[in-house]
Every structure is written in structure tokens, then in C-alpha cells.
């Protein structure tokens, strides 16, 4: 494992950028992304929260403790230059969205899935005009092209910063429906995690949870929470 870099700055803060937005600075020098771009974000609240991540570092810098910095850097380095590709990557989840594949049994799980997922499928239809097909079992079912197109348009409506958070949430949840609901404020991070992990939670209730499951679920919960906080700070 590579040694973590030393903290070589005294203080972290934010300054207004010349072209708009807010730069995160260390001793008045801009923080740089991995691709060496200045780390600038649209809202003061997000900039200050990112600066707080840097200010909280001790003698060694721990990148894993700075999720907001990571998401902003991804937005600048990876999303903005390849926006169309990222939109396509997110949109692909709609073809096999988690909330569209329901169990055939046991009945308790069937009912729990319907109660948690169907309102979000209905919301997706009402909000975006995307009529997604729901099926029982694991055999893939093609989604209507009109629905996929409507969701792609909804994804494309977001800027690079929100796309980065949307991509993170989508990958963590396995669902573009859940990710869009999180972005739109239809559900919060706890509800998104509960919906994404519904099947796993049901199994754990029956059979218990091992250490690997606990670790995996904690990581997913943290990823979803980071995306939700990032989005909240963007809108502040």
C-alpha cells in the first residue's frame, strides 16, 4: 500500500473564482484534481464543505475520508470532458433497473418489493413520462424505447457536477430510478439504501449477516450518503 502524502499546508478555505463559482484553496493555492485542474465548484456551501475535508486532515492525508473532494474531482476530470459517454453509461441502467425485477416468491418479499419500488416506478412515469415494464423473475425484459429515451433526456438535463453524483448513486443502487429519485429529492439517502438493499436485507433477516456483507453494505451506504450530501450542498 502506498504511503499517504503528508499534509504540507496550514489551512484550507475557499475563494471566489474569476469565472464564477468557488475555488478550494490550501494556503491560498488552489487544490488541484488528479488531472491537475483547479478544484472549483458552483456553490459556496459545497466549496466550504470540501475545504472542511482538507482542514480535517491530520499529519497524513487520507483520500478515503474526502468523498466530496472525490466526487467534485470526478465531475471535473472525467464527467465534463466525456459528458455524452457518462450520460450513456447511466442510461444503460434503465434497461435492467433493479426496481423493475420482482421476486415470484416468497409472498412477504413480493409484497415488500411492491410497497417500496412500485411508488417509485409510478413516480418515474409521472415525472418523466417513462413507462417502465415490471416483470417477475430474472429473465431480462426489454424496456420500451420511449421510456429509455425519456430517462436519457432526464439524465442529460443535469450538469457535470450532478451527473457525477448521479453516476455514483446509480452504481451504488443498481438503479437509475433510485438515483434520479435521490437527485430530485423524492427520496433521501436512507430510503435509497433501503430500497437498493431490500432483497439483501430480507435475506439477512432470514439467515443472518456475515462480516463481508456488513462491510459491503456499509460501503454502499456511505457512497449513497456522499452522493446525497454532495447534491444537497450543490443546491444550497
Image (spheres, rainbow, N blue to C red):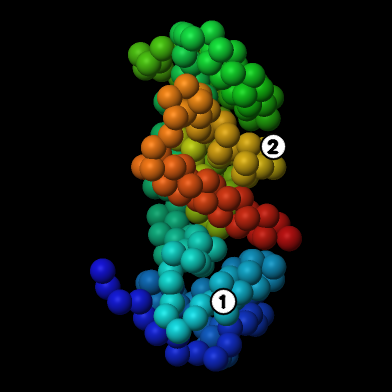
Q: Is residue 134 above or below residue 235?
A: above
Judging from the image, what secondary structure is the residue with disc 1 in?
A: loop
Q: Please tell me which residue lies in front, 85 or 60.
A: 60
The residue located at (47%, 22%) in the rendering is 206
Where residue 38 sits: x, y (%)? 49, 77
Q: Is residue 68 visible?
A: yes
Residue farthest toward the right in the current orientation of the protein: 236
Q: Is residue 151 above or below residue 46?
A: above
Numbered badge on residue 186: 2
Residue bearing the label numbered 1: 56
Residue farthest toward the left in the current orientation of the protein: 1
The residue located at (54%, 86%) in the rendering is 26
The residue located at (40%, 85%) in the rendering is 6
The residue located at (40%, 55%) in the rendering is 82
Judging from the image, what secondary structure is the residue with disc 2 in?
A: loop
Where residue 119 sits: x, y (%)? 66, 22
Where residue 49 sits: x, y (%)? 63, 69
Where residue 80 sits: x, y (%)? 46, 59
* Residue 179 lies in quadrant: top right
Is 187 left or right of 80, judged from the image as shown? right
Q: Please tell me which residue lies in front, 159 or 30.
A: 30
Q: Is residue 223 above or below residue 20?
A: above
User: Is label 1 or label 2 in front?
Assistant: 1
Is 203 left or right of 195, judged from the image as shown? left
Q: Quadrant of the C terminus?
A: bottom right
Q: Quadrant of the N terminus?
A: bottom left
Question: Is the residue marked by circle 1 packed among few (<14), some (14-19), or many (20+) residues within 10 Å?
Answer: few
Amino acid at each position: 500500500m502506498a504511503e499517504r502524502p503528508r499534509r504540507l499546508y496550514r489551512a484550507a478555505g475557499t475563494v471566489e473564482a474569476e469565472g464564477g463559482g468557488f475555488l478550494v484553496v490550501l494556503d491560498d493555492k488552489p487544490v488541484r484534481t488528479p488531472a491537475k485542474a483547479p478544484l472549483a465548484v458552483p456553490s459556496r456551501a459545497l466549496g466550504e464543505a470540501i475545504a472542511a475535508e482538507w482542514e480535517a486532515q491530520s499529519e497524513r492525508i487520507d483520500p478515503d475520508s474526502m468523498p466530496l473532494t472525490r466526487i467534485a474531482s470526478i465531475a471535473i476530470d472525467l464527467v465534463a470532458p466525456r459528458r455524452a459517454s457518462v450520460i450513456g453509461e447511466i442510461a444503460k441502467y434503465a434497461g435492467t433497473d433493479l426496481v423493475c425485477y420482482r421476486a415470484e416468491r416468497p409472498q412477504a418479499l413480493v409484497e415488500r418489493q411492491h410497497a417500496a419500488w412500485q411508488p417509485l416506478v409510478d413516480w418515474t412515469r409521472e415525472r418523466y413520462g417513462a413507462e417502465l415494464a415490471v416483470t417477475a423473475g430474472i429473465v431480462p425484459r426489454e424496456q420500451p424505447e420511449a421510456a429509455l429515451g425519456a430517462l436519457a433526456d432526464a439524465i442529460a438535463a443535469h450538469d457535470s457536477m450532478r451527473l457525477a453524483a448521479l453516476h455514483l448513486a446509480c452504481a451504488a443502487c443498481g438503479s437509475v430510478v433510485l438515483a434520479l429519485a435521490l437527485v430530485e429529492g423524492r427520496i433521501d439517502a436512507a430510503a435509497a439504501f433501503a430500497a437498493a438493499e431490500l432483497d439483501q436485507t430480507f435475506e439477512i433477516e432470514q439467515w443472518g449477516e456475515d462480516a463481508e456483507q456488513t462491510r459491503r453494505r456499509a460501503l454502499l451506504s456511505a457512497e449513497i450518503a456522499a452522493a446525497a450530501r454532495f447534491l444537497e450542498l450543490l443546491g444550497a
